[in-house]
Amino acid sequence: MDGDALFDGWERAWSGRNPKAFDPLCDPGVRYEDPLCPEPLDGAAAIAAHAARLWDAFPDARLNRTGERLYGGVYACSPCKLLGTHQGRIGRIAATGRELEVHVLVYAELRDGRLLRVRAFYDVWAAARELGIVPRAGTAGERAMLLLRGFGLRA
């Protein structure tokens, strides 16, 4: 599978709500990490279970390409954007009804045209701000939170 077909499939898998869509994209030894994974996930089924938690919280979640993909030997990188409306719980956080738009960078090691090691990078703090979980920058709420966390007052 060529790089564009692979990442197009990856985006369709995250957007399509079909847990089996990850299987043909992933090497049997695939390992996945992102900021919300406490430990790396091993296997396409574990990635699909992680995606199912996203789909529960964001039923309209979709992953869209945002720029040029880079390929070099066994490594590839794809910029994309996760979009969705927070309609369900994320851990202990109740649905906010807010829309989320988070830029994601997917970096992967490939083996035989399939994903072997995948790491997704995104700004969890910015996502929390969009969902109203943490205060927006420059607000009294942010200053109060920083004060409580021991960072003192800031101008």
Image (cartoon, helix red, strand yellow):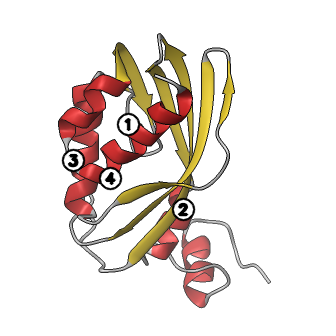
Determine whether label 1 and label 3 are within 8 Å by CB: no
Number of the front mark, 1 or 4: 4
Residue at label 1? Answer: 38
First along the sequence among labels 3 and 2: 3
**Residue at left 48%, top 17%?**
113
Q: Nearer the viewer, residue 77 or 7?
A: 7
Residue at label 3? Answer: 52
Determine whether label 4 and label 2 are within 8 Å by CB: no
Q: CA distance from mark 2 to mark 1?
A: 16 Å
Question: Where does the image place residue 105, in percent across and percent down from the top left?
Answer: 58, 45
The answer to whether residue 133 shows anywhere in this view is no
**Residue at left 71%, top 79%?**
153
Question: Where does the image place residue 116, in percent across and percent down from the top left?
Answer: 45, 18
Q: Quadrant of the N terminus?
A: top left
Residue at label 4? Answer: 15
Question: Where does the image place residue 71, in percent across and percent down from the top left?
Answer: 66, 27
Report the amino acid beneath label 3: Ala
How many neighbours does mark 2 have within 10 angstroms: few (below 14), some (14-19), or many (20 or more)?
few
Q: Quadrant of residue 62?
A: bottom left
**Residue at left 22%, top 28%?**
45
Q: Secondary structure at mark 1?
A: loop
Residue at label 2? Answer: 125
Report the amino acid beneath label 1: Pro
Question: Where does the image place residue 111, in percent across and percent down from the top left?
Answer: 49, 11
